[in-house]
Image: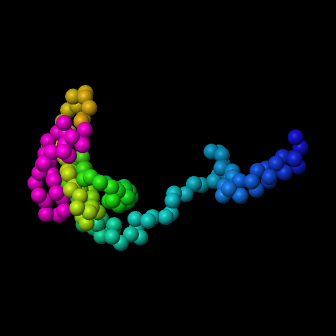
Amino acid sequence: MNRRIKAQIKELIKRGLVKFGYQIQRVPSAGSNHIYRANSIHLWNEHDQFNDLMRQISGFTLVDKVRCFMIYQYAQQVTNLPGDVAEVGVYKGGTARLLAKTFERTGKTVHLFDTFSGMPPSEGKDAGNVLKCLEKDYGVRYPIGIKEIDKGKIP
């Protein structure tokens, strides 16, 4: 097939795809000098409510700001779903506070599960079902919006 026919076919395909909102773009090969840049849009820096929460949990979490923002966004997406909330593995409570503040006005109970004594040795079986634990009435009332804290293994 000659070059002119190939070019006409490519142009016809491109026009057809544009009608449906698509665009074809060549991706540089691995050996090219093209530099891929990381996403320069940092929504977590522009979100005042999230940044206030990050200041509150600073020093109480090992989770970085980007992942905390993801947790925050996911939590906001499910505020209208029925049921309570559980965090498994609490450490110092930073992300627990993040969840508690996010769900504060929903009436949901935030259940926290942790051994508070490190990770137990694996027994080679399933760690269990969190939902079974949520059916029971656990806990200690916590003043920062956390409703339930449970010590021990999850069955």
Query: In the image, residue 35 lies at what x, y percent?
Result: 59, 55
On screen, residue 126 above or below 105: above
- Which residue lies at the image location 44% right of the left edge and 65% below the top edge? 43
Question: Which residue is outermost to the left?
Answer: 140
- Which residue lies at the image location 14% right of the left edge and 42% below the top edge? 152
Residue toward you, 15 or 152? 15
- Per the rendered image, the range of residues in magenta is 129-155
- Which residue lies at the image location 49% right of the left edge and 64% below the top edge? 41
Left or right of 43: which side holds 15?
right
The stretch drawn in magenta includes residue 151: yes
Quarter of the figure with residue 129: top left
Question: Which residue is outermost to the top?
Answer: 124
Prevailing SS of the magenta stretch: loop
Residue toward you, 48 or 15? 15
Query: In the image, residue 75 lies at what x, y percent?
Result: 33, 57
Q: Quadrant of the C terminus?
A: top left
Left or right of 25: which side holds 111?
left
Query: In the image, residue 31 lies at what x, y percent?
Result: 65, 45
The stretch drawn in magenta includes residue 134: yes
